[in-house]
């Protein structure tokens, strides 16, 4: 089943991009208005300090926190990490099959390699989502330790996302035919 994902790479890319666009539009045109212009914790690639995290939570208030929890973490951010992960697995398989050495590997090993490259990102993204959702649902649980943990998970998520992206780019470049 995983091997067939490479056939659907284009459709998965389109679906991932569509969900990403919707999430980005919500972020810039709705969520930031709830927080007085502060970016969501998910958007802070380099992480955030406990003071910055607390400022965001305070600016949101209970109502804004509930809105973001429902419209982001309980809807789109349940779907997006899985969708993006499946998309990256499909792209690793599709771009890898253009390479002689990758094609020569047994199909199960190709799938295993793709999943092993993507799974750490998936787990980190869901862990980060749970940490931030907990902060939003229980404002009293927000303390320097929980905010630092959420920040570390945010940085980890983006660092782990870079691994399959780099592999896909490397496979794409290596698979291009030279004149």
Image (spheres, rainbow, N blue to C red):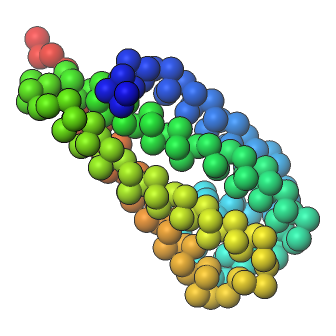
Horizontal side of residue 175 vs 133, given as left or right = left
Q: Position of residue 152 (x, y in %)?
A: 49, 73
The answer to whether one can see residue 172 in this image is: no
Q: Position of residue 44 (x, y in %)?
A: 57, 62
| Residue at image coords 11%, 32% | 105
Horizontal side of residue 125 vs 171, given as left or right = right
Image vertical order of residue 55 relative to residue 162, above or below: below
Q: Position of residue 126 (x, y in %)?
A: 55, 58
Image quarter in which the N terminus is found: top left
Residue that lies at the very extreme toward the right in this rendered image = 63
Decide which of 61, 76 is in the foreground and name it. 76
**In the rendered image, which quarter is residue 88 located in?**
top left
| Residue at image coords 61%, 61% | 129
The answer to whether one can see residue 47 in this image is: yes
Q: Position of residue 17 (x, y in %)?
A: 57, 31
Image vertical order of residue 89 relative to residue 12, above or below: below
How many circles with numbers are drawn on the protein? 0
Image vertical order of residue 178 relative to residue 24, above or below: above
Horizontal side of residue 103 vs 172, given as left or right = left
**In the rendered image, which quarter is residue 128 located in?**
bottom right
Residue that lies at the very extreme toward the top in this rendered image = 179
**In the rendered image, which quarter is residue 114 located in?**
top left
Residue that lies at the very extreme toward the bottom in this rendered image = 144
| Residue at image coords 78%, 85% | 140
Image quarter in which the C terminus is found: top left
Image vertical order of residue 89 relative to residue 141, above or below: above
Decide which of 60, 135 is in the foreground and name it. 135
Horizontal side of residue 29 vs 5, given as left or right = right
């Amino acid at each position: 089943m995983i091997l067939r994902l490479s056939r659907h790479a284009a459709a998965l890319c389109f679906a991932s991009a569509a969900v990403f666009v919707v999430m980005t539009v919500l972020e810039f045109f709705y969520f930031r208005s709830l927080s007085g212009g502060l970016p969501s914790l998910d958007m802070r690639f380099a992480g955030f300090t406990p003071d910055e995290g607390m400022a965001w939570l305070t600016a949101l208030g209970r109502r804004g926190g509930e809105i973001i929890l429902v419209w982001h973490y309980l809807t789109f951010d349940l779907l997006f990490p899985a969708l993006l992960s499946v998309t990256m697995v499909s792209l690793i398989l599709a771009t890898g099959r253009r390479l002689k050495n990758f094609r020569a590997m047994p199909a199960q090993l190709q799938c295993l390699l793709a999943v092993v490259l993507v799974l750490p990102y998936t787990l980190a993204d869901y862990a980060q989502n749970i940490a931030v959702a907990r902060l939003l649902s229980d404002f009293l649980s927000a303390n320097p330790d929980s905010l630092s943990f959420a920040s570390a998970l945010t940085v980890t998520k983006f660092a782990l996302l870079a691994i399959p992206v780099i592999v896909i780019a490397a496979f794409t470049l290596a698979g291009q035919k030279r004149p």
